[in-house]
Image (cartoon, rainbow, N blue to C red):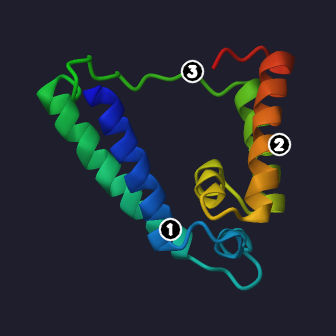
C-alpha cells in the first residue's frame, strides 16, 4: 500500500509540475520545436531543471545502494542504438510535432478534458499496441 501511495504522489507531483511550468500547453511545445521561427526555450529550462533533480536523486540513490522500498538501484545499462530505437524516435518525433503533445502532458491534459488530449491519448495507446505487435517490443 505504501508503494502505491508513493506512486500516486509521484504522479501528482509530475502532473502539477507540467501544469505549473506551462508544459501542458501544446503551443509552448510546438514553439520549442520551431527552431527557425519564434523559438520558445521554456521547455529546455523545464527539462534542464528536471535533469538536475533526477541526476541528484540518482546520485543519492546509488550512494545509498537501495531504492525507497529496498529494491536494488538499477545499473542504468541500456541496449545499444538499434533500428527499433531510431524508427521509434522518428515516429515519436513526428507524432509530437504534429500533435504538440508528449505523453506526459497529453495525459495531464486529460484532467482538463481538453479535446485534443481526449483524441490524442487513445490514439497514442493504439499506436503503442500496434508497435508492440509489428516490432515485437516486449515493454
Q: Which residue is mark 1?
A: 19
Q: Secondary structure at mark 3?
A: loop
Whether label 3 touches label 1, CB < 8 Å: no
Residue 53 visible? The answer is: yes
Give residue 20's position: percent from left, percent from top: 45, 72
Residue ID at (54%, 73%): 22
Q: Which residue is mark 2?
A: 123
Q: Nearer the viewer, residue 25 or 39?
A: 25
How many labels sit on residues?
3
- Residues at marks 2 and 1, CA–CA distance in whole angstroms: 22 Å
Give residue 31's position: percent from left, percent from top: 69, 76
Q: Which label sits on residue 43?
A: none
Give residue 28's position: percent from left, percent from top: 64, 75
Quadrant, the N terminus: top left
Residue ID at (72%, 70%): 30
Give residue 108's position: percent from left, percent from top: 58, 56
Q: Which residue is mark 3?
A: 79
Residue ID at (37%, 37%): 7
Q: Is residue 6 above or below residue 108?
A: above
Alpha-carbon neighbours of circle 1 within 10 Å: few (<14), some, or many (≥20)?
Answer: some
Amino acid at each position: 500500500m505504501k508503494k502505491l501511495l508513493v506512486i500516486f504522489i509521484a504522479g501528482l507531483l509530475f502532473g502539477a509540475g507540467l501544469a505549473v511550468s506551462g508544459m501542458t500547453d501544446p503551443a509552448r511545445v510546438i514553439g520549442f520545436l520551431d527552431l527557425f521561427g519564434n523559438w520558445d526555450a521554456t521547455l529546455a529550462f523545464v527539462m534542464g531543471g528536471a535533469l538536475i533533480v533526477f541526476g541528484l536523486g540518482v546520485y543519492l540513490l546509488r550512494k545509498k545502494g537501495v531504492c525507497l522500498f529496498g529494491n536494488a538501484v538499477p545499473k542504468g545499462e541500456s541496449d545499444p542504438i538499434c533500428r527499433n530505437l531510431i524508427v521509434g524516435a522518428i515516429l515519436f518525433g513526428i507524432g509530437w510535432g504534429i500533435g504538440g503533445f508528449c505523453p506526459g502532458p497529453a495525459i495531464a491534459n486529460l484532467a482538463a478534458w481538453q479535446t485534443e488530449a481526449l483524441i490524442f491519448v487513445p490514439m497514442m495507446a493504439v499506436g503503442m499496441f500496434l508497435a508492440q505487435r509489428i516490432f515485437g517490443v516486449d515493454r
